[in-house]
């Protein structure tokens, strides 16, 4: 339920790039399956603007295939080749422990924008920042966010205060108070 709420808030922002320049990127097909319908309903994006990364197994490890895919109405897969000036990418997942797949997705998207002559605006939204409930893991995530530069934002909810309280005050981080979400749900019913 947080994802549709977040999408509405994201679309209402003054700097929303619009449906022609907004791309939603899921770090795996599972997240795509869970949230695709919400993205279509809330943001009205075309199918080639709703992307996902395939995961591949290499022995015991799972890796991201360094390509971005989208599903065509026919059920076949298309492949996104590049981003252009003015494009904005929104990466969505339900939770993260280390941020590895999320930051891998950012890196891949940024690489695909290199020829555009501009920096790609990226927003990462994670419903729950689990971060293995470890302050050191949160510090590592903060460092990764900072390293991505000022055009990358990280948004999460405060459902796990142990982790999200450590992010408060970071200039690239927004922590959404779930009490606002609950209040909106109550007033909408």
Image (cartoon, helix red, strand yellow):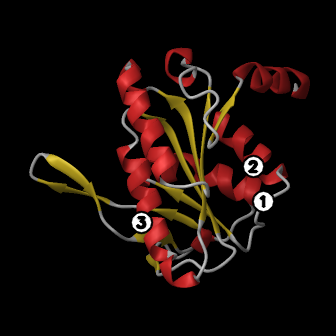
Which dot, 3 or 2, sits closer to the camera?
3
As measured in the structure, the alpha-carbon distance from the residue carrying label 1 to the one carrying label 3 is 22 Å
Instruction: Give the mark, 1 or 3, whose residue is nearer the N terminus.
Output: 1
Give the residue pinned by disc 3.
108
Q: Which residue is mark 2?
A: 10
Q: Quadrant of residue 182?
A: top right
Asked if residue 8 lies left or right of residue 119, the reply is right
Q: Residue at x 37, y 20 (%)?
A: 134
Q: Earlier in the sequence, mark 3 or mark 2?
A: 2
> In the picture, residue 90 is in which quadrant?
bottom right
Residue 136 placement (x, y as % from top left): 36, 25
- Number of marks in the rendered image: 3
Residue at image point 73% right, 74% down: 20
Q: Do the residues under discs 1 and 2 have CB atoms within 8 angstroms?
A: yes
Element type where label 2 sits in the image:
helix
Q: Mark 3 falls on what kind of element?
A: helix
Determine whether 7 is above or below 65 in the image.
Answer: above
Please tell me how crowded label 2 is: few (under 14), some (14-19), or many (20+) other residues with Cα within 10 Å: some
Q: Compared with residue 107, is residue 137 higher up or lower down, i.e. above or below?
A: above
Seen from the viewer's position, the closer of residues 118 and 3 is: 118
Q: Is residue 47 visible?
A: yes
Residue 44 locus on image (x, y percent): 75, 63
Question: Mark 1 sits on what residue?
Answer: 16
């Amino acid at each position: 339920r947080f994802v549709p709420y977040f999408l509405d808030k994201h679309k209402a922002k003054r700097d929303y790039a619009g449906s022609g320049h907004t791309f939603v990127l899921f770090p795996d097909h599972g997240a795509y399956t869970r949230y695709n319908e919400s993205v279509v309903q809330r943001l009205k994006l075309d199918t080639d603007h709703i992307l996902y990364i395939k995961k591949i197994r290499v022995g015991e490890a799972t890796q991201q295939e360094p390509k971005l895919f989208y599903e065509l109405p026919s059920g076949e897969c298309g492949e996104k080749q590049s981003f252009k000036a003015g494009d904005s990418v929104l990466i969505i997942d339900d939770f993260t422990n280390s941020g590895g797949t999320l930051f891998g997705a950012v890196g891949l998207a940024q690489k695909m924008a290199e020829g555009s002559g501009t920096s790609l605006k990226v927003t990462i939204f994670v419903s729950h920042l689990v971060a293995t409930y470890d302050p050191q893991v949160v510090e590592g995530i903060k460092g990764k966010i900072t390293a991505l530069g000022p055009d990358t934002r990280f948004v999460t909810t405060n459902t796990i205060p142990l982790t999200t309280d450590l992010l408060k005050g970071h200039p690239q981080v927004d922590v959404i108070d779930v009490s606002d979400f609950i209040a909106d749900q109550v007033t909408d019913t």
